[in-house]
Image (cartoon, grey):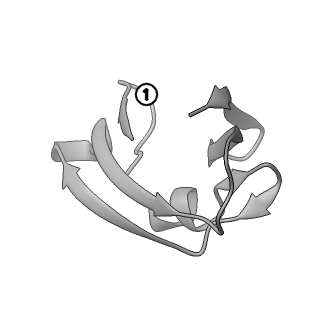
Amino acid sequence: MSLSNYQYDLAQDSIFALATLNGQPSQSFTLLSNASGGHHVEAEVIFEKTTGGTFEITPVEGLTFTFDALW
């Protein structure tokens, strides 16, 4: 997954540690690349086996990004 934005630091460990897929928490994650300030991040997020679903991350309290129908 690659994310880009100019408002939030997407390189925070808590974003991916607390990410969910179909409401289930991530098992692990690895930041593959991170530009200065965390505005452009590429990460590998590992979840328990599933065939698809809704991925959610929360960069700051009160704001959640939802990606539907993955796969």
Going by the numbered disc 1, the residue's amino acid type is Gln
Left or right relative to 41: residue 24: right
- Residue drawn 63% across the image and 45% down it: 57
Left or right relative to 42: residue 44: right
- Residue drawn 69% across the image and 30% down it: 66
As drawn, the residue found furthest toward the bottom would be 27
Place of residue 51 in the rendered image (x, y in percent of width and height, measured from the top left):
67, 47
* Quarter placement of the N terminus: top left
* Quarter placement of the C terminus: top right
Place of residue 41 in the rendered image (x, y in percent of width and height, measured from the top left):
30, 43
Q: Residue 52 appears in which quarter of the rendering?
A: top right
Residue at numbered disc 1: 7
Q: Residue 25 appears in which quarter of the rendering?
A: bottom right
Q: Residue 24 appears in which quarter of the rendering?
A: bottom right
As drawn, the residue found furthest toward the right would be 23
Left or right relative to 29: residue 60: right
Q: Nearer the viewer, residue 16 or 70?
A: 70
Place of residue 26 in the rendered image (x, y in percent of width and height, measured from the top left):
62, 67
